Amino acid sequence: MLAAAMLAPGSTIGIMGGGQLGRMTALAAARLGYRCHVFADEADSPAAQVCCAATVGEFTDCKALACFASAVDIVTFEFENIPAEAVRRVAGLKPVLPRPEILEIAQDRLREKDFLRSIGVETTAYRKISDPAALARAMGDFSYPAVLKTVRLGYDGKGQVTLTPEIDIDEAWRRMGGEIGILEAFVDFSCEISVIVARGADGAWAAYPPVENRHVDHILDTTIAPARLPHEIATRAQVIARHIAERLDLVGVLAVEMFVTKGGEVLVNEIAPRPHNSGHWTIDACVTSQFEQLVRAVCGLPLGSVEHHSDAVMKNLLGSDVEKWRDALNDPLTKVHLYGKTEIQPGRKMGHLTRLVPHPVRQRAPPFRR
Ligand code: AMP
């Protein structure tokens, strides 16, 4: 269904997925006077704790999905691996933004890279791999190391194997764990960056500056914002992100993860049509956060400014790191965000810290016009 031109505050935004991204979206929506209703497959999810209403059900439960759709005015999603059928079913009942077709591209690493190449965006070399024999043949054309990833349902390094001459091909295939794989040439990058771009239904767009992402065990550990890059590369990264958002006809926010190679090339690794972990710094350091931009975009409001009034370093609190929250509060320039998760598991995203480096104040804010 097509979205109405503008959804007024007081309306209800449905959020599919109950994680921390949904939680932070709901908090931003509440500040603008919207209600949020979450659909999640677990009770007391991080998002449900801050929403007005929650439907708890499996994503395959058609009745629960219809009930959810009937209670909301518009729907967005916060999690990539929501079954496409569930999103399509809801889209038959209420407007879903970003459009479900975009989610389907991002859910499949092959479709994603094929799409990127089709619109002239550079990626690392890749090939579809259907079985171990095809992998052995492909390794004749790729050099070691190379990266084998599951095409679907991989995240935070899960379903991913780095191939070296010592690793047995059958063993690598088994460890990858997917039905279909994608073999990628290893990128010897100088840094990993991401750009978050917001785009409204009227085509207006705003891209945050690129940020630098450091991973530990394939999970995002630290984001340095903005990235320390030559101006030309930073601008190129923003232009690429905008181009992708436009060609997807995105309404919402899109995160574009990229590698900057030692030779200064910018290669896109993957896209996520939702707020992103590397954009959490925008809550505390920017005029408008990535979450507020999503709310503005899907509700048909004008986008806000992406200007940042502070530089920032965001550190994820993974697993038992969450216990650092008390110490962190002793630093007045550190903002503490906890996601309300009770069960600590190694590598689980429990919260994050944003340490701010405020820019010097150059001018006073102008008064509101009467
Ligand atoms: P992904 O699940 O594709 O985001 O991969 C997780 C992390 O693995 C990335 O952030 C990189 O650090 C690393 N990685 C993924 N693909 C490649 C590649 N082709 N070359 C080098 N490193 C990669």
Image (spheres, grey):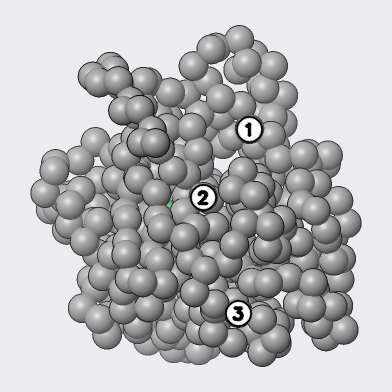
Rendering coords of residue 41 (x, y %):
82, 66
Q: In this rendering, would 60 be left or right of 21?
A: right
- Residue on which the image places disc 3: 95
State the mark number for residue 143.
none
User: How would you rate the neighbour count of disc 2 (Cα within 10 Å): few for under 14, some for 14-19, many for 20 or more?
Assistant: many
Task: State whether residue 226 is above or below residue 258.
Answer: above
Residue 307 sits in quarter: top left
Q: Amino acid at mark 2?
A: Glu
| Spatial CA span between label 1 and label 3 | 31 Å
Q: Earlier in the sequence, mark 1 or mark 3?
A: 3
| Residue drawn at the location 28% of the way across and 65% of the way down | 242
| Residues at circles 1 and 2 in contact by the CB criterion of under 8 Å | no
Residue 150 sits in quarter: bottom right
Q: In this rendering, would 343 be left or right of 319?
A: right
State the mark number for residue 292.
2
Q: Earlier in the sequence, mark 1 or mark 2?
A: 2
Residue closer to the observer: 13 or 88: 13
| Residues at circles 2 and 3 in contact by the CB criterion of under 8 Å | no
